[in-house]
Amino acid sequence: MTQTVVPFYFGLGSRYSYLAASQLERIETETGCRFDWLPLQSGELIRRANRGQSPFDGERVSGQYDWGYRRRDAESWAALYGVPYREPAEFRVDPSNLAKACWAAGADGKLKEMSRQIFNAVFVKGRVVCREVLGELASDIGLDGSNLLASLDAPDVVARHDAALDRAIENGAFGVPSFIVAGRVYWGNDRLPLVEHALANPA
């Protein structure tokens, strides 16, 4: 029987990507699927999907984009899932470098491991993320932190990140986290029950 592979587009600074990621191992066990982790700069995805506009730019267009609401909502989901959660601290690094650090780690087969390291630093430990921290996180999983930092702007790493953005747009994704099941986009941590249902009931 062919294993179903589910593209998982996510942002490393996204509360809801972190929350959704905490449930994927369980869903894989229960459904037999495999999630294909595809990190990207979520702000760039949103702008590309919305012709250069983002609901996070300027005045909030609706209550769901209010930072206080999003913090309380994320805390409620974390309590439901039984996972730790801290409101993220500031980032002192180009947001694209978070995703590119994961793609660089992927050259050694550690994309998912690096993604989890960053999620843990941001949403569990509340660390202020800068380039040096990315290097430390890479070292913690057995990579050469200096080499990883030096490779963030390497053509192959940039190409992998750009390809993930292009593929996300082609798949119809417009935000993170997004999952693609049978050609259909499921956007948001709160759509995970629908993802599970689609996997359990293929057309």
Image (tube, rainbow, N blue to C red):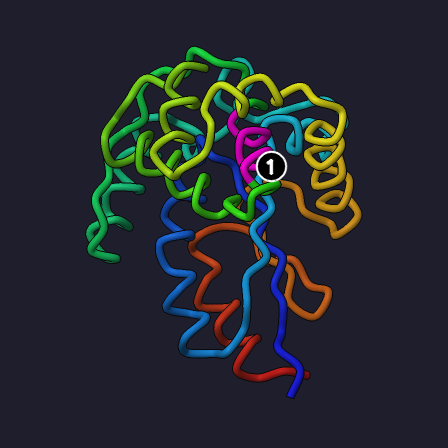
Give coordinates of residue 60: x percent, y percent.
48, 22
Q: Is residue 56 left or right of residue 15?
A: right
Q: Is residue 108 above or below residue 137?
A: below
State the residue at coordinates (32%, 17%). 128
Percent coordinates x, y for residue 183 in the rendering:
73, 65
How many neighbours does mark 1 have within 10 angstroms: few (below 14), some (14-19), or many (20 or more)? many
Q: Nearer the viewer, residue 88 or 150?
A: 150
Q: Quadrant of the N terminus?
A: bottom right
Total numbered badges shown on the rendered structure: 1
Q: Residue under circle 1?
A: 103
The span picked out in magenta is: 98-105
Whether residue 61 sits left or right of residue 69 in the image: it is right
Please give the name of the residue rendered at 44% of the width and 68% of the height, measured from the top-left corner.
Answer: 193
Name the spot of residue 120 as percent of width and height, x first. Answer: 31, 37
User: Tag 1: residue type?
Assistant: Trp
Question: Residue at position x 54%, y 22% from top?
Answer: 147
Chief secondary structure of the magenta portion:
helix
Front-most of residues 112 and 80: 112
